[in-house]
Image (spheres, rainbow, N blue to C red):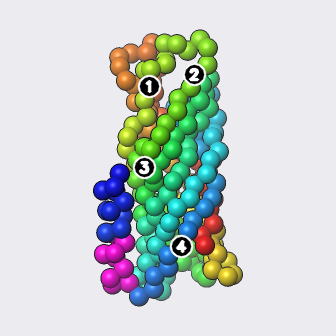
Amino acid sequence: MRKYILLFAWICGLTTAGAQNIDMGVKVGFSSTQIDNLLDSKSRSGFLGGLFVTLKTGDTFAIQPELLFTQSGGEFDFGRIRLDNLSIPIVFKYEIFSPLSLVAGPIFNFKLHDHISFREGYAAVKGQIARRGFVLDSGFGVALDLPLGFRVDLRYIMGLSNALKNKSGDLSGFSARGKSKGWQITVEL
């Protein structure tokens, strides 16, 4: 975990050496995510928050690495999955016109904690699925600059790799494969 935080700090330090305009701050918000390809998936709402550094590389383009704590998961026919992650989005921002920007980029998720609970009747599934330690997602959306230095960011998140895995063997056709998807809305201060 420490090496990922150091890598984030190193990337920020390396890219700020040549940047003219640097903006740093705190980001807080709300997420609503689910894991697709599972039975009757419903979304889980959660908190996200952390730090960001915006490195303006031109008049209309910027790179924004972030270090966030995020909550995700979902509810299903068989139970509930709650996932807590250390997320490192590398966001590329393109200003369409002031104050509106397009944002997109990869999101590197590292498992901090997971809790998988099962309803009665799903004993065969219990202990058979697990959360992957690393998951790659992508995000895209819009950012709106507001007065007094506030910024609102709305992103759609979609998984590029499976969030879950089967621990062993065949589960009578049940597959624990599923990718995260959902929405995040944040305020940057």
Residue lying furthest right in this view?
Answer: 147
Task: Using the numbered discs, state the Cα–Cα distance from disc 1 to disc 3 in whole angstroms.
Answer: 18 Å
Q: Nearer the viewer, residue 77 or 123?
A: 123
- Over which residues does the magenta segment extend? 11-19
Does the stretch in magenta take in 142? Answer: no
Q: Measure the alpha-carbon separation of dots 2 and 1.
A: 11 Å
Determine whether 11 is above or below 132 in the image: below
The number of discs equals 4
Instruction: Provide the residue designation for mark 4.
Output: 25
Q: Which amino acid does label 3 sit on?
A: Asn
Q: Are marks 2 and 3 in contact (CB under 8 Å)?
A: no
Numbered disc 3: secondary structure: strand
Q: Which residue is drawn at 51% across and 44% down?
A: 84
The disc placed on residue 109 is 3
Q: Mark 2 points at which residue?
A: 118
Question: Residue visible at 64% across and 54% down?
Answer: 30
Mark 4 or mark 3, earlier in chain: 4
- Distance from Cα at disc 4 to Cα at disc 3: 21 Å
Q: Residue at x 36, y 68 (%)?
A: 9
Under circle 4, the secondary element is: strand
Farthest residue, direction front: 2
Where residue 75 sits: x, y (%)? Answer: 62, 32
- Check the image and report above or below for 4 versus 152: above
The amino acid type, in three-letter code, at marker 1 is Ile
Query: In the rendered image, which residue does mark 1 sit on?
Result: 129
